Each structure stands twice: as C-alpha cells, then as structure tokens.
Image (cartoon, rainbow, N blue to C red):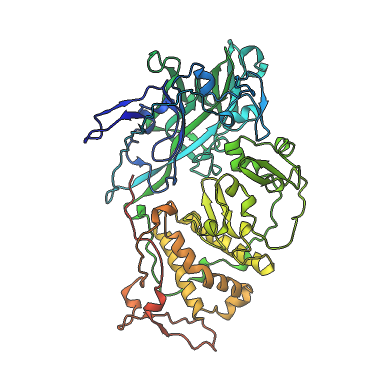
C-alpha cells in the first residue's frame, strides 16, 4: 500500500506505507494472492510459473476483501492486530469470552474494533500491484494451474482462526518436545483429504499424481514457521519460515515475510499420500486469532489451447438431436434430502467461526432446535444448518414459501430478495442453480414460490432431470472444448426440435424409457436457456452488458437458400408425425441472448 499522489508514470509521487502505520491483516482475492502483511512488497508468492504452466484468468471473484487496521497513535499494537476481545471498559482481555456468535474465544476477527484515537488527518491509500500475463499462442497450449488450500486450525477444533495460549497453559499434546515455549500443532491425513480446491472449496478431485509448483503459507505474528511433510519418505515437501522486521520506524516486531517454495521441476506425490501439516508459534505470551494455512499451486494436467481459452462457447444448430447424451429415466436419481448438519460448510462457520452445532444451538442468541439464531447480521433458522443435530425433524410446513431470507445467502451474502437472487449473473435462473465459491444452491429450493415451483411429484422429477443436465454441463464446460460445444449445441438443438414436436423418440426408445416425454418437456422448456448460460464461461459478471451472439447452423448446408433453417429428416419419427422436413424461419429461431467470445488471458 502506498500514500501520496502518483505522477504521470504511475510510480513517482508515492511512498510505501510503513507496516506499523497500516497493518494488512489479510486480503482475499484471486487476481493477486491474498495473504496479509507477510505478502506485501514480496514477489515470490505471485511470481510467474515455469512454462508451460499458467493460471488462466476469467474466474476471479467479483470482489476483494480488505481487512486493514489503522495503527496510528496505537501503543498496544499487538493486542490490536490480534483483535483481542475487550471488556466493557475497553481493556484487552487475556481470558476467554463469548462473542455474538456464541463462540468462546479471547480474540479474532469477531472482536476487531477501531484501535486508534486519531481523528485526522485523512490519508488516501492506494494498493499497488503487478500482474504478469500473456496471451496463449497458437500451437502452444498452457497447462492450467490449480490452487489448493489446507488449514491447521481443525487440529484444535477451530476453523481458520485459533489461539496460542501462554506456554504454561499449552496442553501437553501441543508442546514442542525440545522447546516448551513453542506451540506445535499437527494434522495428519491423506493429501486429497486435507487439501481442498480454491479457498476451502470442493473436496480434492484433481489428478492422481499431484505435481506441486509452489507452496505459499499464511501465518500471523509470533509464527516460527509451517511445514508440509511426506509421512512415507519423511521428507519436507514445503517449508514456510517466518521473517520479522527490525526497523523501529517501519516494521520492528512485525511478521513481514514467509519463505516461499517454488519448484522449476514440479515436486510429485500421489494424491492419497499420507502427509503432515505442522505449524509452530512462539507461546512466550498469549496470541489470539492467529492462522496457519497452506496455499499450494499444482498442475491440473489439463492442457488448454488458444481456442479452448475463449470465455464464450460458440453454440450452433446441429443437423439432429442426439438423444443418447440427454438424461434417461434409468439414469435419474431422486433422493430425499439428506439429513446432515450444513453448519461446517456454511458462511457462518467460514466467516463467523461458528462451526459446532452444540455451541450454535445452545448459544444465548439461539432459541434452540426448530428456532432461530439472532444476531446483528439477522436471523438464521437453526434447522437449516443443524438439521442432524436437531434430530432430523420434518419440515415445518408442506406449503410453498420462499426461504431465501432465512438462509446464509441472505444473512452473510446480502442476497435476500428472490428476484435479485434468481437474476444474478451467478444464477442460471429458476429451475437452475446459483454458483459461488461456497458451492451451488438449487434456486427452487429457496425460491419455490417466486419460481412457481411448489413441490409435487412432477416438480421433483423435473428438478432431478435439470440437476443431471446441469451437473454434466458443469463438469464438461470448464473450458471451450469441442465436447462442451457439442453438449451445448445438442441441448439447444433438441430444445428447438422438441418445441416444434419434430423429434419424438422412436417407439423402441419410448418402450425402453417410459419417462422420455417428461425429459423431452424439460429439455424443450429449459434447453436453450441452459445452453446459453453455460456457454458463458468464468464468472457471470464478466458477461454483463456484452453483445448478443447470433446462433446459426453449425454448417452452411443446414440452411436453405432463403436463409431458413432446414430441420433434419428424422427416420425415427412416429408414423403419424408428418412434420419432417418443415422449415423454421431463422428470425424465430434465433431470438437469443449470449455473450460474444473474448480471448482469455493467462
């Protein structure tokens, strides 16, 4: 971060802000790696990857989170940056207390408050960063890089943040054998269990052999270091050692860097290899709200060409509808909603650090099972996140009510109106899903009344068909591959033909799949919408306001001389169906919305 007025060159006229004036607790974003103060003025965490590896852009979040603390006129800077909880008189506590979420702690993000007494002068700060990128060249594909994350805090039953007790209070299991004033935490397990995709997103589903390109750690003040160890060979895979400032005017006592391991030749381990995560903190005094995270960058083993890196897939009309890639009745799985506790995977846990249903349900702010939890951020229905803990009670009502306002999407994400939720760039609309870093939400589950989707047997079947279609598209259309283009174009083509009743399945197909009529109805009503939505790759916000894509026949031979679309002759049509060969005006077929293709950058 810099202060001052930048000159015409964008470099002169500004000076770096001292860490002991403006403390970066953490940043969260994808254009540049988040981290905290240990990552500022450092180039290693965001250095270029060796060829042919690269992080493909287009999937960055729509926002960045800045947690920055003003330390001007602050004497107790350590208590401040560790967000130590205070009593009613404003005195920092060195004993545990219960925060608004019902979690017992001595500090952390929930206790962060303004520490400075300064009321002026006002200072304008700017964030300065560099991004290195290049266009993918013809015949020079790039191997996409995955970001994987692991967290040490579950070793003490926490999520993201944890405390370091003063050494005499450290449990015996956490004492480093050769140094009793060091807290040493360990987590042991298979690599593909401990590490998640992106920022603690989906379970690992990458290659069977993990090829690690870079290891970046995130720690707080008092950290000695962190390690990732191979339990089979005993070797250290990655090490992040804390470094501290010595300049009283800038950064004395502050963590200002963590060593970064980058491998020109990727370090390989099996995905199921047993590994150990280790962090060590100096426990000479109490430290609160600290962290210990690994950000690993590994090869996806997925080569992406210039054409496949487009942000929009070109959808076109195929000569015929391929029924074989559509859902079949036998392939549909209609399951009752599983009774599980969603609290550990919810924003309440990720951001509020409330991850245990017993604490959540029995907090003073909670009315218990079947009730609500009330905080300054709104109300959350207890059973919506702790259903298993509460004994899997049946739904309160069989009616059709929109429940979005009582979900974490509203409480923590600020999306409380179904109209906004359904029409957001991240949403595929009614009957579809809303996708975010925290997973997918089925639209009709939280907005059934708005979407006219009050549940009945037919609705359940329809949702199962839609889910199978969207799951397949989501798995296939990460890049603009030929397989993705075929699936989208086929879905679009089938939708048109079904609408004109020109693709009724043959009698043999109908006998084998008695549910084909409903599948056909779902594809007819939703196929074009889904094809166009999933043709927009990356974040939905990238495509807002872009020009329409014109949908044409995949090959010129499929158009008649007058410009109308020649629908395919279907040898499998029922005898009574005499519509084969009928033409449909293009002006009717092509009233569509889709974004134009953009070149993807790396």
Q: Image height check: is 322 above or below 567?
A: above
Residue appearing at x 38%, y 26% in the figure = 121
How many numbered discs sit on the rendered protein?
0
Q: Position of residue 373 (x, y in %)?
A: 69, 42
Residue 309 position in % (x across, y down)? 35, 52
Quadrant of the image containing the C terminus: top left
Question: Is residue 104 in view from this perspective?
Answer: yes
Q: Is residue 184 left or right of residue 68?
A: right
Residue 260 spot, x, y in % from top left: 41, 26
Q: Is residue 41 above or below residue 571?
A: above
> Would residue 152 be visible to someone looking at this image?
no
Q: Nearer the viewer, residue 306 or 242?
A: 242
Residue at image position (60%, 63%) is 450
Nearer-the-camera pick, 246 or 250: 250
Specify the quadrant of the image occupied by residue 45: top left
Residue drawn at (59%, 67%) of the image? 328
The quadrant holding residue 457 is: bottom right
Q: Position of residue 99 (x, y in %)?
A: 65, 31
Which quarter of the figure has residue 178?
Answer: top right
């Amino acid at each position: 971060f810099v202060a001052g007025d930048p000159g015409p060159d964008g470099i002169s006229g500004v000076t770096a802000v001292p860490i002991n004036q403006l403390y970066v607790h953490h940043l969260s974003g994808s254009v540049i790696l988040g981290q905290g103060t240990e990552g500022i003025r450092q180039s290693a965490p965001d250095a270029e990857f060796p060829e042919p590896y690269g992080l493909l852009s287009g999937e960055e979040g729509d926002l960045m989170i800045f947690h920055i603390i003003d330390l001007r006129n602050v004497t107790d800077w350590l208590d401040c940056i560790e967000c130590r909880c205070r009593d009613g008189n404003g005195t920092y506590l060195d004993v545990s207390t219960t925060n608004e979420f019902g979690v017992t702690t001595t500090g952390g993000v929930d206790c962060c408050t303004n520490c400075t007494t300064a009321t002026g002068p006002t200072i304008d700060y700017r964030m300065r960063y560099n991004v290195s990128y290049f266009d993918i060249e013809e015949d020079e594909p790039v191997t996409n890089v995955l970001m994987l994350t692991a967290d040490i805090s579950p070793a003490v039953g926490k999520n993201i943040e944890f405390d370091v007790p003063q050494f005499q209070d450290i449990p015996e299991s956490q004492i480093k054998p050769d140094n009793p004033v060091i807290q040493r935490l360990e987590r042991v397990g298979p690599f593909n269990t401990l590490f998640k995709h992106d920022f603690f997103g989906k379970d690992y589903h990458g290659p069977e052999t993990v090829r690690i390109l870079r290891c970046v750690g995130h720690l707080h003040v008092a950290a000695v270091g962190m390690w990732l160890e191979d339990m089979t060979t005993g070797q250290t895979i990655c090490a992040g050692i804390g470094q501290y400032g010595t300049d009283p005017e800038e950064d004395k006592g502050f963590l200002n860097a963590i060593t970064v391991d980058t491998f020109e030749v990727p370090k390989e381990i099996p995905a199921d290899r047993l590994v150990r995560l280790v962090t060590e903190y100096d426990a000479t005094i109490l430290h609160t709200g600290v962290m210990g995270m690994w950000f690993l960058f590994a090869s996806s083993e997925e080569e992406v060409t210039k054409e496949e890196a487009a942000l929009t897939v070109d959808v076109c009309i195929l000569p015929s509808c391929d029924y074989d890639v559509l859902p079949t009745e036998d392939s549909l799985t209609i399951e009752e909603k599983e009774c599980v506790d969603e609290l550990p995977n919810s924003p309440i846990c990720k951001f509020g650090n409330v991850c245990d249903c017993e604490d959540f349900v029995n907090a003073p702010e909670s009315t218990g099972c079947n009730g609500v939890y009330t905080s300054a951020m709104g109300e959350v229905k207890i059973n919506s996140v702790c259903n298993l803990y509460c004994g899997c009670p049946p739904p309160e009502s069989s009616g059709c009510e929109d429940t979005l306002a009582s979900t974490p999407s509203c409480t923590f994400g600020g999306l409380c109106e179904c109209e906004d939720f359904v029409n957001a760039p991240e949403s595929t609309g009614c009957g579809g899903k809303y996708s975010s870093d925290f997973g997918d939400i089925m639209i009709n589950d939280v907005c059934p009344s708005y979407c006219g989707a009050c549940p009945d047997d037919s609705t359940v079947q329809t949702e199962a068909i839609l889910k199978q279609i969207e799951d397949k598209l989501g798995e296939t259309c990460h890049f603009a591959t030929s397989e993705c283009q075929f699936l989208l174009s086929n879905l679009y083509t089938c939708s048109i033909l079904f609408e004109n009743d020109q693709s009724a399945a043959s009698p043999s197909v109908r006998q084998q799949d008695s549910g084909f009529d409903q599948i056909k109805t779902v594809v007819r009503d939703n196929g074009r919408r889904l094809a166009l939505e999933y043709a927009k790759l990356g974040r939905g916000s990238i495509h807002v306001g872009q020009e329409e894509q014109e949908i044409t026949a995949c090959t010129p031979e499929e158009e008649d001389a007058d410009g109308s679309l020649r629908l395919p002759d279907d040898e499998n049509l029922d005898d009574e169906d005499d519509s084969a060969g009928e033409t449909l005006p293009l002006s009717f077929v092509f009233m569509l919305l889709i974004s134009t293709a953009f070149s993807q950058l790396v």
